[in-house]
Amino acid sequence: MSELASESSAQRELASESSAQRGEAIAVSGLRKSYGDHLVLDGIELHVPRGTVFSLLGANGAGKTTTVKILSTLIAADGGRVAVAGHDVATDPDAVRAAIGVTGQFSAVDNLLTGQENLQLMTDLHHLGRAAGRARVAELLRRFDLVDAATKPASTYSGGMRRRLDLAMTLVGSPQVIFLDEPTTGLDPRSRRSMWQIVRELVAGGVTIFLTTQYLEEADELADRIAVLDHGRIVAEGTPDELKRRIPGGHVLLRFATLADLESATRAVGHASRDGDALELRVPHDGSLRSLKALLDRLDTDLVEVEQLSMHTPDLDDVFLALTERKVTAP
C-alpha cells in the first residue's frame, strides 16, 4: 500500500510539474465529486493558461462553487488530479493557498472594522510586518479608490465599495491566481463595470482569474476562454466567439436602396431570407471573416450596390440556453 501511495504521489508531482512547464495556472483532469448519491462533478477537464481570464458558466447547482472550493483547497475531491500555480491541491495544499486569493459570492469584510482595519488585519495574517503592512494598505486603498472611506466602518459602504474592499483584501498576499465566485452579484451596472476594469488591470499585471458568474455579459466581456458546466460535465469550451459560432442563427443583414438591387443580391447570394417591403436580405452566416469576405466577393462580382450591412450572431445567452436546455417530458 505504501508503494502504491508513493507512486500515486510521484505521479501527481509529475503532473503538476508538467502543467507548470506548459504555462498553465490551473490544470484539472478527471475531477470527480459526489455528495452522497448525488454526483456533482463527473470527470471534468480544465486547462487555464497563466495571465488569462477563464470563466466557468453553469446553472444554479451545476457545480461551479464546488469546483472553486476544490481548486482553492476548501474541500477535497473524490477523484482526479488538480494543480494550481504548479502545486498539487491534494499533496501540497499549503503551497496552493500561498499562491491564490479567493473572493466568494458573499463579502468577507468585517462590518465592525473600518476599511483600513480590514486591510491591516489581512496584512497581519500574511505576516507582512508593520512597515510593509502599512505600505501595502495605503497602496491598496489608493488602487481601489477607498482612501476617503478608509476610516469609516465597512457597514457604511455601498455594495460596490464592499466588493472593492473584499478584492483588495484578497490582493494583500499578491496572489498568482484569484478565484472570483460571482463577484458582482447584486451590484449596479456602474459598480459592475468598475469591477471589470479592476479585473482587466489584474490580468494585465500577470494575474490569472478564474471567474464564475451568472451574468453572461460579464463572461463575454472579460473571459479569454469559457467552459459551460452542465450536470457535472463540461459540455462546451472555447473563446466567446467560438462558442457563439456553434449556435445556429447567425446572419448578415443586407439593406438595399432599390428593389432592383435587392433582386440582384437575391440571385447572387442564393439561399437567403428576403423582405421585399424593407428591402432587406438576411443571409445565414457563421460569423467568420472568411465567410463574410466570400459573401462580399459574390456581391461585388455581380456589381450589387449594398446600402447597409450589419452582422448578427447569437450571444452567450443563446449559447448557454442551447447547451444547458432541460428537456421536459409529459408524465
Image (cartoon, rainbow, N blue to C red):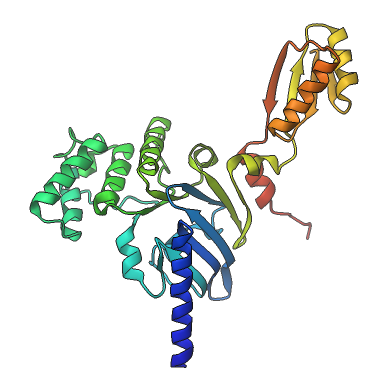
Residue at 54% in and 54% down: 60
Left or right relative to 104: residue 232? right
Q: Position of residue 17 (x, y in %)?
A: 44, 67
Q: Residue furthest left?
A: 130
Residue 192 seen by the camera: yes
Left or right relative to 156: residue 135? left
Residue 114 seen by the camera: no
Q: Position of residue 167 (x, y in %)?
A: 31, 46
Residue at 42% in and 62% down: 84
Residue at 48% in and 77% down: 11
Q: Nearer the viewer, residue 150 or 198?
A: 198
Left or right relative to 104: residue 53? right
Q: Residue furthest top?
A: 258
Q: Quadrant of residue 157?
A: top left
Q: Nearer the viewer, residue 250 or 302?
A: 302
Residue at 57% in and 62% down: 45
Q: Position of residue 98 (x, y in %)?
A: 30, 62
Q: Quadrant of the C terminus?
A: bottom right
Q: Position of residue 166 (x, y in %)?
A: 29, 47
Looking at the image, is 54 positioned above or below residue 316? below
All told, the count of numbered labels is 0
Looking at the image, is 266 positioned above or below residue 238? above
